[in-house]
Amino acid sequence: MRVSARLRRWRPTHAHVRSVVGGISTLGLALITHRPDLVVMATPFVVVAVWGTLTRPSSEPVPSSRLGLRSLREGESTYLHYRVTDTSGVHAVSAVIRYSPWLQIQPVRRAVTVHVDPAGDHPVDVSVGVRAVRWGDHRVGPGALAMTSSWGAFRYGTIPMQEERLLTLPAPVMFDNRAPSPHPQGLVGLNRSARPGEGSEFNTIRPFQVGDRLRRIHWPSSLRTGGLNVTATYADHDSQVLVIVDATNDIGRSDGIDGAESTLDTTIRAAAAVSEHYIRRGERVAMRIFGAGNPTVHSAATGLAHLRRMLAALARTVPGGTYEKQELNPRYRIDPGTLVIMMSPLVSSVTLRRALALASHGLSLVVVDTMPTTVTHDSDEAGAVTLAWRIRMLERRVEIGQVTSAGIPVVDWRGPGSLDQVLRDVGRRAAAPRLAHR
């Protein structure tokens, strides 16, 4: 960051000027009036003025900034480090940070002063604690540095410091799902396939065939029947999961991870929890974020690197995008058997029409209602707003009933176990016989 020439030099402080002027004036007055008491009063000012002038630093300090961690989860903390080199003659280094609503700065006053040994010439570090309380792409700073010499006689700065970017990922909400995926289709994974194959879950005991592994031989039944028998298992398959995130709007008050949640807070954290759960199980997860100012598409993949990319996309979500014609009739390249999980507060009717369009393609769709129970618009000062909100909630209830009657399950988000029962129902429905034309 460029700094003006006036700030790139040591300038006398007002205290030093007062000390010099006051000491010299008092000594002159003492000589004129022949008063020794004035000499005694002027001596401390003169000593401090001479001392501060003799210890004026001659070198130019070089400041730099560094963030301890560039990426955090909600609720985690890091440090913003300011380092000053070439500190010969510097007595104190002070730093101050700009206020940010989603960052808690320690100390609370957002200002830190570190005293330095003027005789030394080693780098000085000024550290400020930073705690992220809400997901998002935040800016730490900008800050400012100032250096002073002995007795506060000379000041260098204030030097503006550039802001640092801090990516805050959604908090790892506790989520667990014990229900199997309704359509396992990959080659490896944790879901039991309907077909026999290499796996870990017992199927049956059958006679030995060419190509069977010797470790599969079941010796008790082989000795009993007089022929070789082997243990057959079900194949272990993985599944593909598509997480659709509705970022159309953000309703309600957000106080960060320690307070109330808005609709977008719950949606983002629920999507992060579901994505992380399936990724760590070895499933292939895709993600679509629609209705946002920065719509995002991630193809199906697995692995921690893919999880990191999806969490970063969720953290950078900006609500309030515009709908385009193709968004009302989505045409995703989705493999057959993909489990689609839509995260939405179901406030916009466009979202419900999107769910109906996805279900019409024969996909296994589950809609997760992420509307927090704390979101209300009850206010005595805005009676029209409260009435409009209640009318919209009644319309929302009717629209959810229409979606449910179309065969699309709608489940409230409540953390662990939210999707267990509905995924079991979807799995039983997928395994049920269907009528087909011949």
Image (spheres, grey):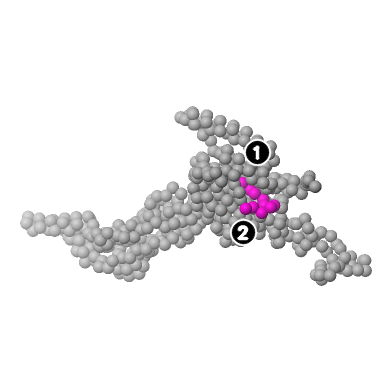
Residue 169, position in %: x, y? 52, 54
Query: Residue drawn 51% across and 34% down?
Result: 377
Magenta stretch, main secondary structure class: loop
| Lateral position of residue 123 relative to residue 300, left or right | left
Query: Residue drawn 47% across and 30% down?
Result: 382
Q: Are marks 1 and 2 in contact (CB under 8 Å)?
A: no
Residue tagged by mark 2? 301
* Vertical position of residue 357 compared to residue 395: above or below: below
Residue 91, position in %: x, y? 30, 63
Q: Does the magenta stretch include residue 337?
A: yes
- Tell me the tag on residue 403: 1
Residue 438, position in %: x, y? 80, 47
Query: Residue drawn 31% across and 60% down?
Result: 2
* Vertical position of residue 209 compared to residue 361: above or below: below
Kind of element beneath mark 2: strand
How dense is the environment of label 1, judged by Cα within 10 Å: few (below 14), some, or many (20 and up)?
some
| Lateral position of residue 225 relative to residue 126, left or right | right
**Camera-side residue: 318 or 5?**
318
Report the amino acid beneath label 1.
Val
How dense is the environment of label 2, judged by Cα within 10 Å: few (below 14), some, or many (20 and up)?
some
Looking at the image, tell me whether mark 1 or mark 2 is earlier in sequence order.
Answer: 2
Residue 11, position in %: x, y? 23, 60
What are the residue bounds of the magenta stretch?
A: 333-342
Place residue 159 in its image quadrant. bottom left
Report the amino acid beneath label 2.
Ala
Q: How many marks?
A: 2
**Camera-side residue: 42 or 297?**
297
Q: Can residue 394 be seen in this view?
A: yes
